[in-house]
Image (spheres, coloured by chain):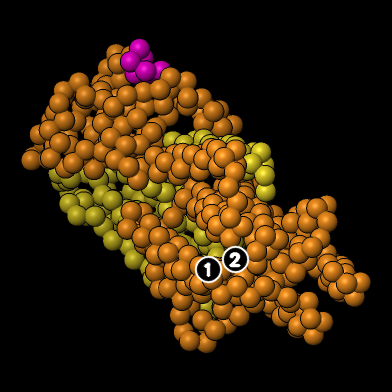
Amino acid sequence: MNGKTKVTIGIVLLIVIFAMSVAYSAFATELKFNGTAEIVGEWDIRIIDIKAISISEGCDAGKPQYTNTSATFDAKLVKPGDAITYEVTIKNAGTIDATLSTVIFKEQENGSEAIKYSTTELASSLNAGEQTSFTITLEYDSEITEMPSIKNKTIIGIIEYVQSN
Amino acid sequence: MTFMEKLKNKNLFIIIAIYLIITILGMLNNAEFYKNVINPIFWFFILVYCLINGCIKCKRDTRIQIYAILFSCFYIIFYFSLGCKFGFSKSPYNHKFFMIIKNWLIQVIPIIGIEITKGVLVQKNKKVMVIIIFIVFIMLEINYYTMFNLIYEKENLMKYIFSNILCLIAQNLIAIYLAIESSYSFILIFRILFKSFFIVSPILPKLDWYIEGTIGILIPFFIYLVFQQILAKKRKRKNNKGRFKNAIFVSIFVFCICLVCFMTGIFSYGPIDILSNSMSPTFNRGDVIVFYKPNENYLKNIPKYSIIVYKFKNQNITHRVIERVNKNGEILYRTKGDKNNVSDRELVKINQIMGIYKFHIKYVGFPSIWLYEYLNQQSIR
């Protein structure tokens, strides 16, 4: 390879890396700073939708957002007994059959006791090309009689799939 | 190359070209069956065909093979160490013994077949044919199933192209260069070892598309640089003009690495685009600000009027601190955009803060903003 070709390749390399940096910067304006693992190819399980399917009158389900590997929503409940249910859809867009290995829903410390949550069960297997949904319901405890001092709660859900046997 | 060798190679190329059509159709119709059954079986038979017909004629260079093993080990350590910065995630692969063997056969046999056939075909061939082979082999490894699924998702499609297809191009470039100049065994050993590590390792670094993509592009160029030195030593070439151009190439390569490190926040400084004019006249929409990440103590005592970058509902905001609030022992900051009349409604927690403004570069952020707006097709508040 002669010197001229080498410099041309170097310039192409620089342009490609620069273009990728521009794109990264554009996506980073909205997504997480460190990003999340996205294995695109044979293994590609991702969230394809999140929507509120049931909202008590006067409540605000916000605008749920999702990336390939994370979903967030901001529910506002007004009075005891109010509830909002979100449906999250996950798709196996890869070519490897997957089995559900871990499902953890945990509350962050110092969250409001007045907000309860429940989830439906996830399908134990998710073959290539299939999709599955689960719901998460947030409820303002109907037995609460006093205004709670802490008014918000963060729930973190971790759902992991591994390759099926 | 003898007439018989030419004929055998021609037949081999025709088989591969026909298989490319099967690949596209197979991936679009039944990707799982194609990937797990057809693809490994096809490449297995191609390897058998090559062995029977004596197509495999790799230059036996023990030194190159040792370099390949050493480089693979170095790369695996480097790749794994990125997890220390970006975190680790559980490997999705099943680690039962028979599943490891199954995964290995499904994924590594095609790699062996592809690299050997590619090496055999490009050796002593015309330039035009080498380009055609280069294109065919890139197309053979594209995941059409994923591409088809992403066709209406502009952002994900772009990420896929950057993190997969550009890497494939770089990888094929270096593979063909090495096959012509030296031997295909380097890339073959490297790909086998790395894939095997990927299949066996219970945890993997949590890298996003940008890191995966830039590594996938820069590593082949790094291999190229290393081989340039090895081959130059071997041929004992001394050319000052060549050295100068080599120095330009090395400088570009080093600059690219620095750019990637800077973009991903590996250094304690990081960049961020400014989307609105809320901080005008300090800086405006389209500027890029550079922020640094201070330590925990500094974050608890950020001086009044400092400009901070923080996360708020999946968005990055850069505003000025106007008050430090101590609420039940928790340190919070009230912020305000210089151009805004009122302060921001929500107080900023320490764990939301990404960094402190250091300086800004005018207009550099516009390409990213245009791309962001094009992909989102919505106005920025």
Q: Report helix, strand or loop for mark 1.
A: helix
Q: Nearer the viewer, residue B3 or B211?
A: B3
Residue extent of the magenta highlight: B277-285
Please identify which colour was used for chain A in the image: yellow
In the rendering, which numbered label is found on residue B187? 2
Q: What residue do we see at 83% from left, 64% from top?
A: B17
Q: Nearer the viewer, residue B70 or B134?
A: B70
Q: What residue do we see at 18% from left, 45% from top?
A: A150
Which of the image's four quarters has the N terminus of chain B?
bottom right
Q: Chain of mark 1?
A: B
| B146 lies left or right of B334 | right
Query: Residue B177, located in which quarter of the rendered image?
Result: bottom right
Please identify which colour was used for chain B in the image: orange
Q: What is the three-letter code of the residue carrying label 1?
A: Ala
Circles 1 and 2 in contact, beta carbons < 8 Å: yes
Which of the image's four quarters has the C terminus of chain B?
top left
Residue B13 % position (x, y): 83, 67
Name the N-terminal-most of marks 1 and 2: 1
